[in-house]
Image (cartoon, rainbow, N blue to C red):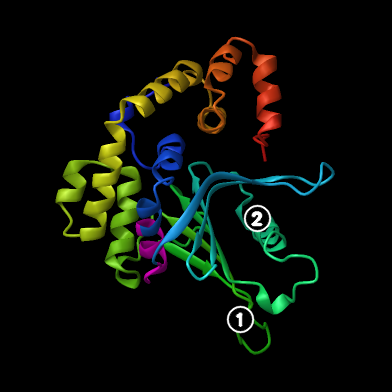
Amino acid sequence: MAKTKNFKDLNLSNAFLFAVAMQDEETCRIVLETVLDKEIGKVKVNVEHTILYSSDIRSVRLDVYARDAVEVDYDIEMQNEDEKNLPKRSRYYQAQMDIARLKPNEIYRNLQPNYVIFLCTFDPFGHQLYRYTYEMCCKETGEPLEDGAYRIFLNTKGKNTGDVPTQLVNLLGYLEHSTDDYVEEHSDVSLQRLHEKVTELKHDREWEGRYMTVGELIDDKGQQEREKIGKLCLLMKNDGRLDEFVEAAAKPELFEELFTEYGLESD
């Protein structure tokens, strides 16, 4: 099994770096505007956002949950392994986001649009497209339902370059090649700004130290387990519990309890 890469050598597709980078509102906005090909404006971001209604109902942990100035919601997920569950997983995420939006007795007309976006380093549907966009429509007439619910799956391995904006192709390439050389090859102002933010983050000694702590734990583990541990570190750091995270490293049973507490069980 490959050893953990240096923090400064990570690509943005790395789950840990992606979650940390997307905490920055400008970084999140750049990604959203590139994916949706429209201006978003200011966004508020909540990384590793949990939606939990009852202990009898499965909780949802969203990688990046954002809301813009006109109350549109966005869930952005970085996906490096094809677990063959994205259609139903995205359906569940969207439903949970909707439930969280309306107060008791509030009318359905107040429900705002929402987007569930998966950034995949594999082709989720096998048609070699960079972007797959799904919204409800009538089977008989083809008319859109216009319910404001959108699910978008991005594919870094796409081939249809002429069918999507160049900025989107550049962003998807950058996820797997987050380097100076890649950015210099493309005349893309948004990409250059995104790279500046990511580079600044990679030189943050505190986050580098956090990543090294995770790295000591995830060497020789599978990809899914590595991502879970990285997310747990980020969550516990945000909760002021990093010392507890380090102490649990040598006690697998405590780690499993923490995975359960933070809703990081396997799908």
Q: Is residue 178 left or right of residue 36?
A: left
Q: Position of residue 29 (x, y in %)?
A: 39, 58
The quadrant of the picture occupied by the C terminus is: top right
Q: Position of residue 89 (x, y in %)?
A: 65, 53
Label 2 SS: helix
188 or 132: which is nearer to us?
Answer: 188
- Residue 30 image-quadrant placement: bottom left
* Residue 38 counted in the magenta span: yes
Q: Residue at x 67, y 82 (%)?
A: 139
Mark-to-mark CA distance, 1 and 2: 19 Å
219 or 232: which is nearer to us?
Answer: 232
Q: Residue at x 66, y 29 (%)?
A: 259
- Residue 18 image-quadrant placement: top left
The disc at residue 93 is 2
The quadrant of the picture occupied by the N terminus is: top left
**Chief secondary structure of the magenta span?**
helix
Q: Position of residue 156 (x, y in %)?
A: 39, 52
Residue at which label 1 appears = 146
Residue at the farthest right position: 56
Circles 1 and 2: CB atoms closer than 8 Å: no
Label 1 SS: loop
Residue range in magenta is 30-40
Q: Residue at x 37, y 70 (%)?
A: 39
Residue 184 in sight: yes
**Could you tell me the amino acid type at mark 2?**
Tyr
Vertical side of 110 occupied by 118: above or below: above
* Residue 24 counted in the magenta span: no
Vertical side of 119 occupied by 132: above or below: below
Q: Position of residue 71 (x, y in %)?
A: 54, 67
Q: Is residue 170 left or right of residue 80?
A: left
**Could you tell me the amino acid type at mark 1?**
Glu
